[in-house]
Image (cartoon, rainbow, N blue to C red):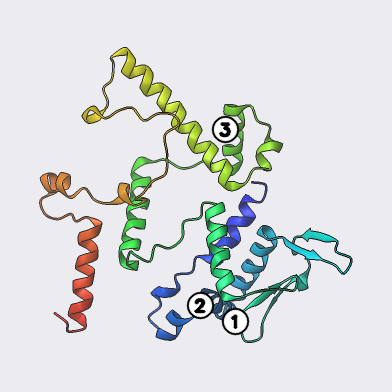
Amino acid sequence: MKNYNDFYDCVSCLLLDKNSVSNIEVISMSYLNYLLAVGMSEPLFLTALDSLLKLVLTVKTTDENGVTTINAPTEQDDIRFSEDLKCLTVKGELITSEDFDLLIDVICEQNQIEQIDESISKEVRDALEEAEKFKRRQSGSKMCSVEDRLVAIGISTGYTLDYLYDLSIRKFNKMAERIDHTLHYKIYLSSVMSGNMKMKDGAPLQHWMADLSVEDKNQNSKVDYGAYKEKMGDTSIDADELEQIIKNKESKEKGEI
């Protein structure tokens, strides 16, 4: 958590929407090749990649005496890009395109970074993102700063700020999510037991240790077609319909339908 802001400043270099570029040569490139090629014209991305690798990587090396050491890449020459822009080395260890794809998955999984869902077209992803922005504007809610979040978790748990600063981003986010869920569980349980509240449609109260993973991260952003149809006629569509409309439009432009 002590590197939270630095990490998020540079992790965007792993989230370029490569496969939405309408160029067959780009689509056929590995992500590492594409990132390095983009970095040649926009050095900011290479700087971000260099900073990110220095934040998240350690390299194990063994000398001729069999002594093993684990060090993070820190020096300017610890990270080098090959001249053909197809691979890079970190403290002399080769990172191929395949290695880099695995590295992206690990970094995103460990730090709860949402990768691009290529099963959804770019147009629909953009529409869902706009829906999320609209929801935030309507609710008037704004997440507090990282410092305030650390303070809030410290107050809730009794942990010192020094302890929280040493937590991984993943652990901290999971802690915050569980604290919020447990607080709501206690409120709902008290209300249900007192008879002042009933769960919607008779659904059981979700336990405070229930699995909080979400299968469809876009579920809350999709338009409830049935509900809006009653209020607004047929002017609203859900994400699936939007994607089909876009597909039909693309096919029409190509003369397929």
Point out residue 214 in the picture as x, y percentages from the top left corner: 38, 46
Q: Nearer the viewer, residue 110 or 247?
A: 110
Q: How far apart are marks 3 and 1 (CA)?
A: 45 Å
Q: Which of 69 and 149 is in front in this view?
A: 69
Q: How far apart are marks 3 and 2 (CA)?
A: 42 Å
Helix, strand or loop at mark 1: loop
Q: Nearer the viewer, residue 239 or 111?
A: 111
Point out residue 182 in the picture as x, y percentages from the top left corner: 46, 28
Q: Mark 3 points at which residue?
A: 152
**Can you see residue 157?**
yes
Query: Looking at the rendering, which quadrant does residue 74 occupy?
Result: bottom right
Residue in the image at 40% along x and 29% along y: 207
Q: Give the amino acid type for the residue marked by disc 3 in the picture.
A: Ala
Residue in the image at 57% along x and 27% along y: 156
- The answer to the question of whether label 3 and label 1 lie on touching residues, with beta carbons closer than 8 A, is no
**On the picture, is 14 further left or further right than 186?**
right
Q: Mark 1 points at which residue?
A: 86
**On the picture, is 39 further left or further right than 255?**
right
Q: Give the amino acid type for the residue marked by disc 2 in the picture.
A: Ser
